[in-house]
């Protein structure tokens, strides 16, 4: 291990102030500079690293010469050069600050023997053999120390990751023969037995234990894996049932009743009234113990896992104030109950208020056997809108089942009831709809605050028919996708695509909440929120049966957390597929990565608007 020293140090000196008084003062000393000739590259760099902390003022010249030679040799040995010729001179005889080295590195030592062995259960465990097979040096190569040290570290890491807690190195040596320019390296490991998962002990839970045991990703007797312990911790944390959580494997000392008494001896006793004397009775010999164990081999060692939890706060509240150019100031308030009862049911309610849009919504979740990935959901909501030519009051209730699959896709199958009292342009109506639906979605991101990589997909299908009491018959499909990719450290690209369609002969009965409108911060910038759709004979928006939007945005870092952006958006809502001319806009923007997520400010110009005005868009939060 190399220690890096600061380039300048201080030493203490004493100054007499009077009888019995001394003042300690700091006298500056400086690290020595080294100029190396005769070698180059990483070997020369390593020599400089070894010498950079050397303080010439701390040594006499002869001792300093020996120290420089010793450090230089150590720096070159790690690259296989054990007998270099070193010539040196200093810039001055007293307290030199610079040394000039001319080095002939000589002949290197080359690998003559590479002997790596594995014993114990690890010899049949593929990652160990793969680590050895990946050793980068071969016979005849110049010896380097780093790969050998890396292999040792890798094998040690695997023992912890994969449950070999009784491991030891049986051989770890390098035999260097500089006179023969050869090196022999040996590394032997006895992993001992692989531990197995034991019982899982849960303490402090307010949720029925069976629900938690269904989250355990391993069974009793499975080979130990540290990643499984981490996965258990992650699953328990994802439930949001707990305020604090610890998952800790317990390594129990294995006692051999043949060789030792039941107590461990006085040196293990703490806070007892009577300390037992050290055991002095007959002990079985090592050979006899080995023979006995071969006749009656012990069971595989196990690793119990202790889980300690405390309940999360039963009631959690959050309030927020924001602003977006589409809706102006907005207020949000949420009340969440991460656990309602001992079965892990949860409940949340939200209120959203802005000038054109007021909403109240809630979700009650009932987890099933796999609490994280399988649940029933009851959702409900009220919404009042007054946007452009739309006035609507909507109430909705739906009940469905939600699945999360191993490939990150989510599926929801539901039945929804909607009552909507609306006025769209010159048309007013009250409708009651009952329709089933299915939705598939997936969101993946890296660095959620400001994603450097990510994608989002959504596809939803809904069907309504008059035979079961709906006021309208329709089939509705919506889908969208968005992608974020980063090129280098300073370039980021975002692409979006959205489509929607309604097939119906009862379009007059379709409420505004199911018709299509585009325009705004998240669709076609340059146009106001939901201002693009077909118009009736009076010029009022009536909503479309189809929708198409697309966007491409390129961002580049300006400095630090500031980014610039350019973008092009197209899209519209329309009655006949395909529109003759999609609405287009383009613009520039600025992004600042704040602690609460990116703050986005855009200036967009619409190319198909009669007013031909620029429009400002402002929003807080990541793209998805």
Image (cartoon, rainbow, N blue to C red):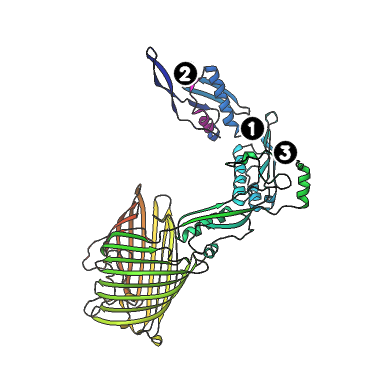
Q: Earlier in the sequence, mark 2 or mark 1?
A: 2
Q: Gap in Å between the C-alphas at discs 2 and 3?
A: 63 Å
Determine whether the residue tagged by mark 2 lies in a helix, strand or loop.
loop
Q: Nearer the viewer, residue 610 or 83?
A: 83
Graded by Cα atoms within 10 Å as few (under 14), some (14 to 19) or many (20 or more), the crowding at tag 1 reads many
Residue placed under numbered mark 3 in the picture: 280
Residue placed under numbered mark 2 in the picture: 95
Q: How many marks?
A: 3
Residue range highlighted in magenta:
44-59
Q: Gap in Å between the C-alphas at discs 2 and 1?
A: 34 Å
In the image, taking residue 7 as reference, residue 185 lies left or right, namely: right
Q: Is residue 396 magenta?
A: no
Asked whether residue 175 is in view, the answer is: yes
Q: Is residue 594 above or below residue 116?
A: below
Residue placed under numbered mark 1 in the picture: 108
Q: Is residue 70 above or below residue 148?
A: above
Q: Nearer the viewer, mark 2 or mark 3?
A: 3
Q: The C terminus is located in which quarter?
A: bottom left
Q: The N terminus is located in which quarter?
A: top right
Provide residue 398's location: percent of width, then percent of height: 40, 75
Q: Is residue 592 above or below residue 3?
A: below
To which quarter of the image does residue 540 belong? bottom left
Most extreme residue toward the bottom is: 467
Q: Gap in Å between the C-alphas at discs 3 and 1?
A: 56 Å
Graded by Cα atoms within 10 Å as few (under 14), some (14 to 19) or many (20 or more), the crowding at tag 2 reads some
Q: Which mark is residue 558?
A: none
Q: Residue at x 61, y 51 (%)?
A: 162
Residues at badges 2 and 3 in contact (C-beta under 8 Å)? no
Provide residue 110's location: percent of width, then percent of height: 66, 35
């Amino acid at each position: 291990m190399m220690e890096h020293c600061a380039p300048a140090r201080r030493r203490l000196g004493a100054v007499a102030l009077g009888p019995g008084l001394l003042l300690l003062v700091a006298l500056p000393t400086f690290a020595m500079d080294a100029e190396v000739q005769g070698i180059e590259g990483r070997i020369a760099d390593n020599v400089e690293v070894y010498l950079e902390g050397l303080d010439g003022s701390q040594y006499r010249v002869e001792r300093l010469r020996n120290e420089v030679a010793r450090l230089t040799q150590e720096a070159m040995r790690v690259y296989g050069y054990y007998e270099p010729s070193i010539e040196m001179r200093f810039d001055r005889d007293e307290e030199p600050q610079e040394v000039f080295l001319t080095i002939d590195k000589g002949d290197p030592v080359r690998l003559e023997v590479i002997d790596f062995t594995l014993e114990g259960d690890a010899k049949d465990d593929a990652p160990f053999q793969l680590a050895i097979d990946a050793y980068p040096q071969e016979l005849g190569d110049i010896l380097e120390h780093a790969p050998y040290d890396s292999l040792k570290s890798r094998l040690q890491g695997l023992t912890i990751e994969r449950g070999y807690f009784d491991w030891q190195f049986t051989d770890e040596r390098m035999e260097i023969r500089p006179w023969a320019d050869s090196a022999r390296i040996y590394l032997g490991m006895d992993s001992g037995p692989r531990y197995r998962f034991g019982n899982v002990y849960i303490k402090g839970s307010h949720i029925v234990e069976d629900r938690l045991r269904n989250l355990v990703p391993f069974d009793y007797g499975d080979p130990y894996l540290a990643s499984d312990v981490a996965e258990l911790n992650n699953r328990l944390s994802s439930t949001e049932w707990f305020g604090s959580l610890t998952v800790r494997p317990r390594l129990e000392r294995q006692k051999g009743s043949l060789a030792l008494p039941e107590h461990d001896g006085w040196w293990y006793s703490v806070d007892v009234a009577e300390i037992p004397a050290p055991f002095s009775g007959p002990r079985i010999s090592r050979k006899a113990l080995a023979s006995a164990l071969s006749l009656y081999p012990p069971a595989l060692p196990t690793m119990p896992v202790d889980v300690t939890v405390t309940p999360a706060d039963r009631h959690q509240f959050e309030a927020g104030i924001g602003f977006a150019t589409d809706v102006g100031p907005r207020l949000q308030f949420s009340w969440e109950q991460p656990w309602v009862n001992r079965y892990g049911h949860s409940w949340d309610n939200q209120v959203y208020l802005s000038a054109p849009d007021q909403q109240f919504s809630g979700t009650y979740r009932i987890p099933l056997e796999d609490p994280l990935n399988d649940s029933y959901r009851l959702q409900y909501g009220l919404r009042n809108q007054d946007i452009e030519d739309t006035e609507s009051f909507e109430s909705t209730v739906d009940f469905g089942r939600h699945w999360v699959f191993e490939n990150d896709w989510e599926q929801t199958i539901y039945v929804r009831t909607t009552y909507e009292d609306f006025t769209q342009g010159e048309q007013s109506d009250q409708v009651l709809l009952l329709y089933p639906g299915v939705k598939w979605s997936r969101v993946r991101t890296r660095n959620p605050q400001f994603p450097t990589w990510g994608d989002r997909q959504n596809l939803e299908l809904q069907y309504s028919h008059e035979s079961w009491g709906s006021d309208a018959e329709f089939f509705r499909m919506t889908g969208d996708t968005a992608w974020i990719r980063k090129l280098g450290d300073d370039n980021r690209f975002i692409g979006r695509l959205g489509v929607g369609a309604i097939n119906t002969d009862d379009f007059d009965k379709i409420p505004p909440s199911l018709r299509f409108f585009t325009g705004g911060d998240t669709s076609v910038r340059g146009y106001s929120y939901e201002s693009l759709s077909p118009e009736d004979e009076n010029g009022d928006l009536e909503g479309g049966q189809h929708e198409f939007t697309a966007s491409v945005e390129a961002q580049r870092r300006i400095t630090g957390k500031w980014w610039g952006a350019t973008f092009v958006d197209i899209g519209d809502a329309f009655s006949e597929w395909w529109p003759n001319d999609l609405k287009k806009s383009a613009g520039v923007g600025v992004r600042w990565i704040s602690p609460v997520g990116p703050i986005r400010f855009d200036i967009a110009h619409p190319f198909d608007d009669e007013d031909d005005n620029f429009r400002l868009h402002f929003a807080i939060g990541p793209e998805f």
